[in-house]
Amino acid sequence: MNTTTKTIERPDVREDTTTSDDTPKFFHYVKKNKIVESAVSGRMVVALCGETFPVTKQAKPGSPVCPDCERVYRSLRKK
């Protein structure tokens, strides 16, 4: 019996979440009370989309919002 093993390469499909000046590509929806806590303590927060990160920047009006967070937020607002 002759068997062979092949390695299938899986491409890295992670999206780049920062720009060249360290500004996040998208801003995420996070519980308001967790934002200040994270900014002060450096603790990780969990966005509506499930991404975890420490809060380091504040979104300005018109900043791009994570499409997954936006979708979850809109579905919560309808209830």
Image: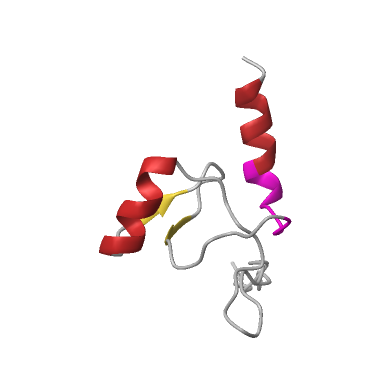
Residue 14 location, quadrant: bottom right
Q: Nearer the viewer, residue 70 or 56?
A: 56
Q: At x 50% / y 47%, what residue is drawn?
A: 47
Q: At x 44% / y 40%, what residue is drawn?
A: 31
Provide the major secondary structure of the magenta segment. Answer: loop
Q: Going by the picture, which residue comes out furthest to the bottom?
A: 20
Q: Going by the picture, which residue comes out furthest to the top?
A: 79
Q: How many marks?
A: 0
Q: At x 65% / y 69%, what residue is drawn?
A: 10
Q: Nearer the viewer, residue 35 or 19?
A: 35
Q: Nearer the viewer, residue 1 or 9?
A: 9
Name the spot of residue 68 as percent of width and height, x first: 66, 45
Residue 42 on the magenta segment? no
For the rendered model, the colour scheme is secondary structure
Q: Quadrant of the C terminus?
A: top right
Name the spot of residue 32 as percent of width and height, x first: 43, 42
Q: Quadrant of the N terminus?
A: bottom right
Residue 40 location, quadrant: bottom left
**Taking 54 as reference, is 2 left or right?**
right
Residue 66 on the magenta segment? yes
Q: At x 30% / y 64%, what residue is drawn?
A: 42
From what the image shows, is residue 65 above or below residue 16? above
From what the image shows, is residue 57 above or below residue 31? below
Magenta span covers which residues?
Answer: 62-69
**Taking 23 as reference, is 65 left or right?**
right
Q: Going by the picture, which residue comes out furthest to the front?
A: 61
Residue 38 location, quadrant: bottom left
**Taking 62 as reference, is 44 left or right?**
left
